């Protein structure tokens, strides 16, 4: 049974979806949630679903081995960034090569990089009058949103769509595709 650790910064809807998807799976299980936000709703979701969860500060993440030690003690097989907003430190990536993945709410390389997350991505898609957008599941490297692409899924953007409409379409793509891609990766 593979052990999955999820990093999230906010609501945690993707984390909850992944926890539920793997609850009865023989492939893997979400065993830990980590967040940089002590007030994140993901902490409540994890508690409700019986998954241990911890928050940490910037110093613990970037200047100490606290988070790395947690991952090692958890024996993490796959690390998932699901709405995690901080750049992932190289020292952790070195310990988990091709074992850290992220879901981005656009078709990379478009609308990626520092500051491009959530509503900012959807607003940019609408402002640039894109006719399609989607999600990109990719490996994490030392640069924002530049790791190798694992999977992309697309949806149409109508001329009448606003950023909230786009967000709703992206959410549906994430809910469907993210668990399936993670499940496939657990076989590797």
Image (cartoon, rainbow, N blue to C red):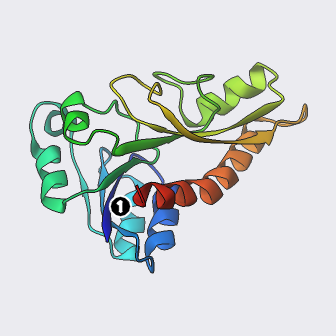
Above or below, 184 against 124 in this view is below
At a point 36% along the width and 69% down the height, the residue shown is 29
On the picture, is 133 further left or further right than 66?
Answer: right
Q: Residue at x 39, y 52 (%)?
A: 40
Where residue 169 appears, x then y in whole percent? 74, 48
Going by the picture, which residue comes out furthest to the front? 188
Residue lying furthest top:
128
- Secondary structure under badge 1? helix
How many other residues sit within 10 Å of disc 1, few (<14), some (14-19) or many (≥20)? many
Q: Residue at x 48, y 24 (%)?
A: 115
Of 116 and 188, nearer the camera is 188
| Residue indicated by mark 1 | 43
Q: Position of residue 64 (x, y in %)?
A: 9, 36
Count of numbered marks: 1
In the depicted view, which residue is nearer to us: 103 or 122?
A: 103
Using residue 158 as the reference point, say whether residue 20 is left or right of it. Answer: left
x, y percent for residue 111: 61, 23
* In this rendering, position of residue 140 left or right of residue 63: right
Which residue occupies the extreme bottom position in the image? 24
**x, y percentage for residue 14?**
51, 56
Residue 136 lies in what quarter of the image?
Answer: top right
Rendered view: 143 above or below 36: above
Image quarter where the C terminus lies is bottom left
Q: Is residue 174 left or right of residue 33?
A: right
Image: 91 above or below 3: above
Quadrant in the picture for the N terminus: bottom left
- Front residue of this view, candidates 99 and 13: 99
């Amino acid at each position: 049974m593979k052990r999955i650790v999820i990093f999230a910064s906010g609501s945690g809807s993707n984390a909850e979806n992944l926890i539920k998807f793997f609850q009865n799976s023989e492939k893997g299980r979400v065993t830990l949630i980590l967040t940089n936000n002590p007030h994140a709703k993901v902490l409540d979701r994890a508690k409700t679903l019986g998954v241990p969860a911890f928050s940490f500060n910037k110093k613990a993440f970037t200047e100490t081995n606290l988070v790395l030690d947690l991952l090692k003690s958890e024996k993490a097989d796959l690390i998932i960034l699901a709405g995690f907003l901080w750049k992932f430190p190289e020292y952790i990536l070195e310990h988990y090569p091709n074992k850290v993945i992220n879901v981005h709410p656009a078709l990379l390389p478009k609308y990626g990089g520092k500051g491009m997350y959530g509503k900012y991505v959807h607003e940019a898609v609408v402002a640039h009058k894109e006719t399609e957008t989607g999600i990109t599941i990719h490996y994490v490297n030392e640069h924002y949103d530049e790791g190798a692409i694992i999977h992309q899924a697309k949806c149409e953007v109508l001329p009448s769509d606003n950023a909230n409409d786009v967000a709703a379409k992206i959410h549906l793509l994430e809910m469907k595709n993210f668990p399936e891609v993670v499940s496939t990766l657990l076989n590797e």
